[in-house]
Image: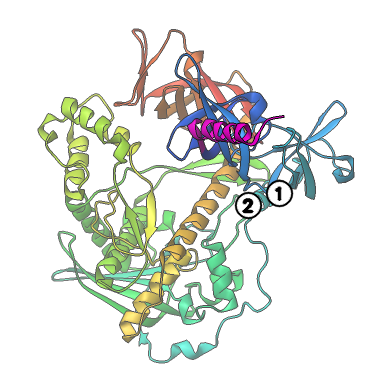
């Protein structure tokens, strides 16, 4: 037996070994293959072998010991599971021999999870499921799930919308008491019912947020933007308000829309329908002949829209191809052109992109994809909305509100940008590209440059995403010192908040308190809604593509480039897929500065047109691989 001194020495030795181990905590990250990585808190990425990857889920927080091999590469040894955020998820029912599994619909999740016999509930292979983790695999590599709901089969009518709603946990039900207040809102409002306001939108739109009117004068034009005023009916903290806040925005899924407010409100009582008296928040601007904005005013008003006009009809009217009988449309068009000229000179105008309309049949399956080019009526409305939104950001001053900011270039890409500037725009080599003024100068120089490189597209891929903030910050994308939005309060909860801030300032009241947590929650909900819409569109797009033969050749534009290949967008349908570099003859090098792949024979660059064919397609996993034709 060991004496007490020997035992104490052993304990000290064990403590010393533990203390000298390279250990850390971090998050598990999956890959396209069976192995994974642990991103430690100190930013190191440590390799996790396939056997260990079987014991964890992507997103798990774990403690590991880091081993270093002879080549200096890190390898993880799992020590402890600290937290596993994965709880409920959607997936596809899979049968492998005698085993029944769910294939989780999760990013970089490459394992099947076992469904015990008691949980199979007459599910058939291919069924789409909503499941919950019942047993984590950390102990022995074996996991189990509980089936909460069989959502349906892939061929069922409307299954894509139902599944997407469940996957992204989009709220499905309204509280029992989701009514609005009475007509007391009429008292004390500016009466603008005699002005010939009109709404301009898609023919099928019913949730009409805004109506427009303009009239020329000796100094330019008076422009009025009337915005639906749901805040006049919906009290903060009421059941309807809380339900709208939880949704954060309307989510437009093909054939399966989820409004932020009940249709009775968003398409009825608060919508700026033609020939109906409606409460509105009206922004009045003086637009000069050169497009400058002055004399910004806001009022709570009562309006009476005279017509619901479509983009196509308005475009025809302003080009004298049709007479709609509304003279103010010509003034609106002239004012919008002046506003656009001013923005091009003093701010930034984002490049236009076509829209793609997914046409569904009676079974809500995709039938066709229609490319919709923007016309002058779209641009007219856009300029008026931008004018009102940037004006309210200025008018609010120090009033607490929500703002939309865009922080410019990513810090980790500034060196790449400077290298491109040094070669292609040397006159700007000393500019401070992290400042709004010099960034605007950079983008304008890109537009005027004769460089063979698509400079503006390259820099656009190096930008930070936009954010919702509680204080005004620059919006680099628009070239504005401050920006917010209030023109879509039926569809975006952040716009409803800003509208309440406008009302508070008009009435001399204290504005609604907004904290960082509120802004973050809204931003997360908005991102979730956008992802839901994008993924459902991809699902339907890939179903559409699957109906074509594998020999079909498509004309496509290179949209993104990295070391592994490049993604392309088909010109006729907007469908995105990926071309792997390894499928292209000859070893390709990647230039991280100009975002291109090249060798002595080939060059692949952003905005370049290529011809491609489908090589691999899985509509459920939203995986689409192309090869060059």
- Residue 49 or 159: which is nearer the viewer? 49
Q: Is residue 320 visible?
A: no
Q: Which percent across, then down, holds residue 418? A: 21, 32
Q: What's the magenta bit mostly, secondary-structure-wise?
A: helix
Report the residue at 13% width, 35% height from top: 428
Circle 2 — which element? loop
- Chain part drawn in magenta: 1-24
- Residue 43 or 606: which is nearer the viewer? 43
Q: Is residue 6 magenta?
A: yes
Q: Is residue 38 magenta?
A: no
Q: Which percent across, then down, holds residue 213? A: 32, 70
Whether 130 is drawn above or below 585: the answer is below
Whether 386 is drawn above or below 13: the answer is below
Report the residue at 30% width, 40% height from top: 411
101 left or right, relative to 572: right
> Badges 1 and 2: C-beta atoms under 8 Å apart?
yes
**10 Å neighbourhood of mark 1: few (<14), some, or many (≥20)?**
some
Whether 157 is drawn above or below 12: the answer is below
**10 Å neighbourhood of mark 2: few (<14), some, or many (≥20)?**
some
Q: In this figure, which residue is indicated by the disc labeled 2?
A: 255
Circle 1 — which element? loop
Q: Which percent across, then down, holds residue 235? A: 51, 81
- Residue 94 or 157: which is nearer the viewer? 94
Report the residue at 69% width, 51% height from top: 162
In which quarter of the view is residue 448 placed?
top left
Q: Earlier in the sequence, mark 1 or mark 2?
A: 1
Q: In this figure, which residue is indicated by the disc labeled 1?
A: 158
515 left or right, relative to 269: left
Quarter of the N terminus within the rendering? top right
């Amino acid at each position: 037996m060991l004496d007490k001194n020997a035992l104490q020495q052993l304990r000290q030795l064990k403590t010393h070994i533990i203390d000298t181990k390279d250990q850390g905590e971090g998050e598990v990250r999956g890959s396209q293959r069976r192995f994974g990585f642990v991103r430690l808190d100190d930013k190191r990425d440590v390799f996790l072998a396939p056997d260990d990857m079987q014991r964890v889920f992507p997103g798990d927080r774990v403690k590991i010991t880091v081993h270093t091999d002879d080549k200096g590469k890190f390898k993880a040894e799992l020590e402890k599971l600290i937290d596993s955020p994965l709880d409920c998820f959607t997936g596809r029912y899979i049968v492998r021999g005698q085993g029944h599994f769910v294939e989780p619909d999760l990013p970089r999740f490459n394992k099947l999870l076992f469904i015990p016999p008691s949980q199979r509930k007459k599910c058939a292979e291919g069924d789409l499921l909503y499941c919950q983790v019942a047993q984590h695999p950390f102990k022995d590599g074996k996991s189990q799930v509980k089936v909460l709901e069989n959502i349906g089969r892939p061929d069922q009518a409307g299954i894509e919308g139902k599944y997407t709603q469940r996957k992204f946990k989009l709220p499905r039900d309204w509280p029992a008491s989701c009514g609005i207040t009475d007509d007391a809102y009429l008292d004390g409002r500016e009466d603008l019912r005699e002005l010939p306001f009109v709404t301009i939108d898609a023919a099928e739109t019913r949730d009409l947020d805004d109506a427009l009117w303009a009239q020329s004068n000796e100094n330019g034009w008076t422009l009025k933007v009337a915005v639906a005023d749901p805040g006049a009916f919906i009290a903060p903290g009421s059941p309807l308000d809380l339900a709208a806040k939880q949704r954060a925005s309307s989510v437009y899924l093909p054939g399966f829309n989820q409004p932020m407010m009940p249709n009775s409100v968003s398409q009825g009582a608060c919508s700026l329908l033609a020939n109906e008296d409606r409460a509105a928040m009206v922004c009045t601007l003086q637009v000069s002949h050169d497009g400058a904005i002055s004399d910004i005013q806001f009022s709570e008003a009562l309006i009476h829209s005279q017509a619901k006009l479509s983009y196509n009809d308005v475009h025809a009217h302003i080009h004298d191809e049709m007479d709609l009988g509304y003279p103010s449309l010509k003034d609106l068009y002239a004012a919008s052109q002046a506003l656009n000229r001013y923005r091009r000179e003093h701010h930034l105008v984002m490049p236009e992109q076509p829209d793609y309309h997914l046409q569904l049949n009676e079974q809500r399956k995709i039938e066709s994809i229609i490319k919709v080019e923007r016309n002058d009526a779209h641009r007219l409305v856009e300029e008026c909305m931008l004018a009102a939104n940037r004006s309210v950001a200025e008018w609010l001053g120090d009033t607490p509100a929500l703002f939309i900011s865009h922080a410019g270039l990513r810090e980790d890409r500034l060196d790449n940008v400077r290298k491109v500037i040094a070669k292609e725009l040397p006159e700007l080599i000393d500019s401070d590209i992290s400042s709004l003024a010099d960034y605007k100068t950079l983008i304008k120089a890109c537009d005027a440059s004769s460089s063979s490189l698509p400079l503006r597209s390259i820099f656009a891929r190096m930008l930070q995403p936009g954010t919702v903030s509680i204080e005004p910050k620059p919006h680099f994308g628009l070239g504005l010192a401050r920006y917010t939005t209030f023109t879509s309060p039926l569809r975006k909860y952040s716009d409803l908040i800003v509208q309440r801030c406008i009302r508070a300032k008009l009435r001399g009241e204290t504005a609604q308190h907004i904290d960082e947590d509120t802004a973050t929650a809204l931003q997360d909900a908005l991102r979730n809604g956008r992802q839901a819409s994008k993924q459902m569109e991809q699902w339907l797009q890939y179903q559409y593509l699957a109906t074509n033969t594998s020999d079909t050749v498509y004309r496509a534009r290179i949209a993104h480039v990295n070391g592994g290949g490049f993604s392309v967008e088909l010109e006729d349908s907007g469908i995105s897929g990926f071309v792997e570099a390894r499928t292209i003859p000859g070893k390709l090098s990647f230039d991280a500065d100009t975002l291109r792949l090249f060798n002595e024979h080939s060059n692949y660059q952003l905005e370049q047109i290529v011809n491609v064919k489908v090589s691999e397609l899985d509509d459920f996993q939203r995986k689409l691989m192309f090869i060059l034709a």
